Image (cartoon, rainbow, N blue to C red):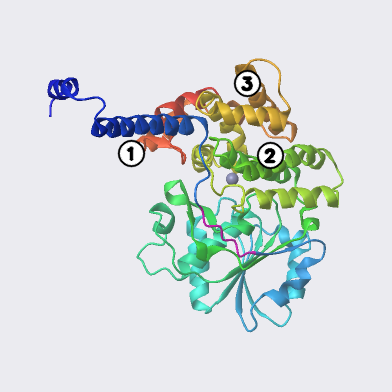
Amino acid sequence: MNKSKIKEQLLNFDHNHPQFLIRYSINLLIRIKNKLSKININKKNTMNNFNFYNPVKILFGKGKIAELSKNVPENARILMTYGGGSIFKNGVYDQVKAALKGFNVIEFGGIEPNPHYETLMKAVEVVKAEKIDFLLAVGGGSVLDGTKFIAAASLYEGELAWDIAAKSIAVTKALPLGAVLTLAATGSEMNSGGVITREATQEKFAFGSPVLFPQFSVLDPQVTFSLPQRQVANGIVDAYVHVIEQYLTYPMNTPVQDRFAEGILLTLIEEGPKASNSETPDYENRANLMWAATMALNGIITVGGKSDWSTHMIGHELTAFHGIDHAVTLAIVLPGVLRLMKDKRREKLLQYASRVWNINEGTDEQKIESAIQQTEAFFRQVGILTRLGEHKVGQDTIDRIVNRFTQRKMRAVGAQQDVSIANVGELLKTRL
Ligand SMILES: [Zn+2]
């Protein structure tokens, strides 16, 4: 029926006729409902549905490595994985060996920072040759991530295990694993994900699956005492940016998750500089940093909300091309992302400025800029250089990164797809 016909009918209609009144009332109700739902959408998003599952048993505190024997399956054939050998200097190796006396333990060392696929596949060969049925990662996030990949790749039936990461192939089975954490940073000890690098192609990809949760993780803050300052600083910044990636997006009416996130950020701001400015490590300080890093990425602050991860995705490329420490890449990229997002993510940025940095004066624009500056100053305070130029990275690398994203046919980075590839080059330019 066309418009003029409707008009004609309406004019001829008896406006007191019940049919007209009913139709009029229904139309009115629909209009009101539409208006209300529009207001709701604009005003407040609601928490998304979620399933939360985290089965990792945490053994936290002084001397907890001794409890390994009670947590590793009896009669297991264990592959103990580790990194560059710092566990021999800080006493962790001896503690683990003592705790696992009588167990069948084979060792695989040399897992590098940003663990290489090539190295991990050598461990898979050992797993198969030695009929390993339990993996024990002893180290920081790289050793843990690498060990998760070994767990998945050992039972992978496809042709190329790299596809688990590169093509995000679903991992449905994996060897069971446990962990002894030596560095608080990535949160890998209490989640089911990891990131690996393929040296041959300079690519870095994430992977994950519920079958990759460690069965247990031992967190003894004392083992972080011997870490070089650079690694302590990296851990603080990595944990901080993990929280930001899950928190600083869009309001979703998730006050519990928001306040958990803000609590972790405030703890890192309080405890971080103490750790990086002190010659002698303090147990309480290291304990709080360790638990903050674990809480930052065990899933609890992300449920029901909107996460981002664009800073990580851009940062991974800087590591892939230049081998820059993961946390350092985040400290470089994050201020650029936040400035770019200052209009779209205004509401959450203002909340961050007020609740985390106590910035309540000035215009919205000034508050946001001040919060971004404070964030960068905090990274520098714990000892991280936050500009590309300070790492001898120039425009040519920015072009390579943008080209790479374009070649992958990506239009945007991050879970919200609000950081467009066209803007990546621009934001990196502001970080030179
Ligand atoms: Zn990270």
Q: 306 above or below 184? A: above
Q: Residue at x 65, y 48 (%)?
A: 296
Residue 312 shown in magenta: no
Q: CA distance from mark 3 to mark 2?
A: 18 Å
Q: CA distance from mark 2 to mark 1?
A: 35 Å
Q: Residue at x 62, y 34 (%)?
A: 331
- Which element carries disc 1, helix, strand or loop? loop
Q: 101 above or below 15? A: below
Q: Which residue bears the numbered disc 2?
A: 262
Q: Which residue bears the numbered disc 1?
A: 409
Where residue 36 appears, as percent x and y from the top left, is 44, 31
Can you tell which of label 3 and label 1 is closer to the viewer? 3
Whether residue 232 can be seen here: yes
Q: Which residue bears the numbered disc 3?
A: 369
- The first of marks 3 and 2 along the sequence is 2
- The first of marks 2 and 1 along the sequence is 2
Segment colored magenta: 50-56
Q: 364 above or below 134? A: above
Q: Amino acid at mark 1?
A: Lys
